[in-house]
Image (cartoon, helix red, strand yellow):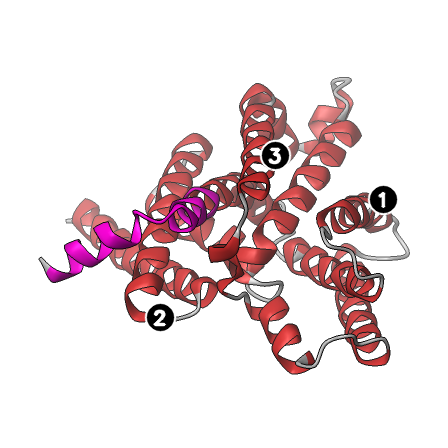
Amino acid sequence: MFVADKLIMYFQFPFVRYAMVVGVLIALCSSLLGVTLVLKRFSFVGDGLSHVAFGAIAIASVFNLTNNMYLVLPITIICAILLLRTGQNAKLKGDAVIAMISVGALAFGYLLMNVFSTSSNLTGDVCSTLFGSMSILTLTSREVWLCFVLSVAVIVIYVLFYNRIFAVTFDEVFMRATGGHAEIYNLMIAVIIAVIIVLAMNLVGSLLISALVIFPALSAMRIFKSFRSVTIFSAVLSVFCAFFGIVISLLTGTPVGSTIVAVDTLAFFACCGAGMMARGGARA
């Protein structure tokens, strides 16, 4: 009962409720596109864009911007589009472009934060940006509403264009051959991923975002085989892990982002075990 009483006490504070709403929404949005990224063998695009967002945050800190979202989001979206376009170039393979952007943006951002630092705790600021911090517990109602609106937009777009996303995920060549506008839907996926990356920065940090995107999809694929089943289970599992990750973080005082990723990792191994048991039972 002590744990329940403690949680009830915590949830009386608005900032805790804000953090839970934002965490669950980000986890839900991340899981939806994670399935597509894994199947298209583009899993590390989230990692590359998260490092771009880190560089953009460094630029915002140099100019002392109070709300860096207005700078970070456009830069990340532009880089997502450039990444898609360049990745289709035969001379530059997609994985090489991601690696180039990822390392370059990370180095550039850290260099800017060192040269033009206005903080007395540069190491702490860098670690918080890379690995997440408790800043999600200091969200204002305006930031929560912004996250809510963007998350709802992502979910609505995904639901409305589900069939097109399915087609471009499994057979982009066939979609082009039948007159489908594969470029437009690839572009839409890139923009949505960029929005998700920026939203997730405060939750898990730039180095852990890929885990939030990829782990639920990989976990769902251990058990289910159809695209729809994998997507639904991935979304449910991601929300579950985010919720319990935040709860555990509140109770134990551990970093929010690392705790959520740790729960996602444990869920992945649990799903691997469940999948092995299901296949063993089917053979028997």
Residue 253, which numbered label? 2
Residue interval drawn in magenta:
2-23
Front disc: 1 or 3: 3
Q: Is residue 240 above or below residue 3?
A: above
Under mark 2, the amino acid is: Gly
Residue 85, which numbered label? 1
- 105 vs 127, left or right, is right
Does the image show residue 220?
Answer: no
Residue sitting at x 42%, y 40% = 235
* Label 1 secondary element: helix
Whichever of labels 1 and 3 marks the residue nearer the N terminus, that label is: 1
* Of residues 193 and 117, the one drawn nearer to the viewer in this rendering: 117
Residue sitting at x 41%, y 43% = 234
Front disc: 3 or 2: 2
Under mark 3, the amino acid is: Leu
Residue 170: give x, y in percent of width and height: 60, 35
Quadrant of the drawing holding the N terminus: bottom left
Task: Look at the numbered discs 1 and 3 and tell me whether their residues touch, using CB distance below 8 Å.
Answer: no
Residue 150, which numbered label? 3
* Of residues 216 and 259, the one drawn nearer to the viewer in this rendering: 259
Real-space Cα separation, disc 1 to disc 3, in angstroms: 24 Å
Residue 73: give x, y in percent of width and height: 74, 46
Residue 210: give x, y in percent of width and height: 57, 58
Real-space Cα separation, disc 3 to disc 2, in angstroms: 29 Å
* In magenta stretch: residue 15: yes
* Label 2 secondary element: loop
> Could you tell me what secondary structure mostly forms the magenta stretch?
helix
Whichever of labels 2 and 1 marks the residue nearer the N terminus, that label is: 1
